[in-house]
Amino acid sequence: MNDFILAPSLLSCDFANLELQIKMLNASKADWLHLDIMDGVFVPNITFGQPVIKYIKKHAQKPLDVHLMIVEPDRYISDFKQCGADILSVHYEGNIHLNRTIAKIKECDMQAAVVLNPHTPVALLEDIIDDCDMVLLMSVNPGFGGQSFIANSLKKISQLKDMIIRHNAQCLIEVDGGISLDNYRSILKAGADVLVAGNAIFATDNPSATIDKFKA
Ligand code: DX5
Ligand code: ZN
């Protein structure tokens, strides 16, 4: 159970001290840095874009896991590669030509992930799962940190795990939203490989010690 990837979400960190936060993550047991890109159209919130990622990349010694919550992500795929993304996640709900989008991400030498909102059935991935390096299951409605984990997500993790096994696909399961020290074990038990946590890490007095607790 300890062998999972932990990806702290910088959405909840102190952006005035970004360099310090990244150095803390470099020295911690965190595996990836999860970056939430929101455009105020696909989701009702705005965060940051390529110029900020470029400087995060300058300091980060771990892979950048970039979660796009934007319309028309196809327009920016090579930009995200250039500013330092290692893994690029695009929403099923925001893409008409998902097969083409996934291919483009891979052509740009990034790992490609498809994201499902809480209401989107796992079964819709049947014809794209073999092309995905990862599927990201949203366990909250995207847009904000600090929301509660939607319990139905556990069922979706198991369904996705079954699909991956059935296809013999090389695809990780990432879960994002409302993950805490109280519920993360059940999420891993359901089949998750990668856990994103924002508030549960950065809202504590000692984020590095909290990361240790997740990894203990
Ligand atoms: C929400 C984002 C998440 C968010 C998770 O739209 O995709 O990555 O930062 O935050 P917590 O862990 O606080 O729910
Ligand atoms: Zn996210």
Image (cartoon, grey):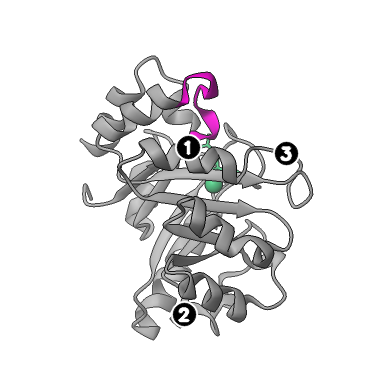
State the residue at coordinates (20%, 35%): 216
**Which secondary structure class fits the magenta region best?**
helix
* Residue 177 visible in this rendered orientation of the protein: no
From this view, report whether residue 168 is shown above or below residue 156: below
CA distance separating discs 2 and 3: 30 Å
Query: Where is ligand 1, by quadrant?
Result: top right
Residue stretch rendered in magenta on the structure: 10-18
From this view, report whether residue 45 is shown above or below residue 157: above
Residue 208 in the image: state x and y as whole percent: 30, 25
Mark 1: which secondary structure? helix
Label drawn at residue 150: none
CA distance separating discs 1 and 3: 22 Å
In this orientation, which residue lies closer to the viewer: 162 or 16? 16
The mark lying in front, picked from 2 and 1, is 1
Q: Is residue 118 left or right of residue 151?
A: right
Residue linked to disc 3:
45
- Sequence-earlier tag: 1 or 3: 3
Question: Could you tell me if the residues under marks 2 and 3 are in contact, i.e. CB atoms within 8 Å?
Answer: no
Residue linked to disc 1:
55
Mark 3: which secondary structure? loop
Q: Is residue 122 left or right of residue 171?
A: right
Residue linked to disc 2:
131
From this view, report whether residue 75 is shown above or below residue 30: below
In this orientation, which residue lies closer to the viewer: 2 or 21? 21
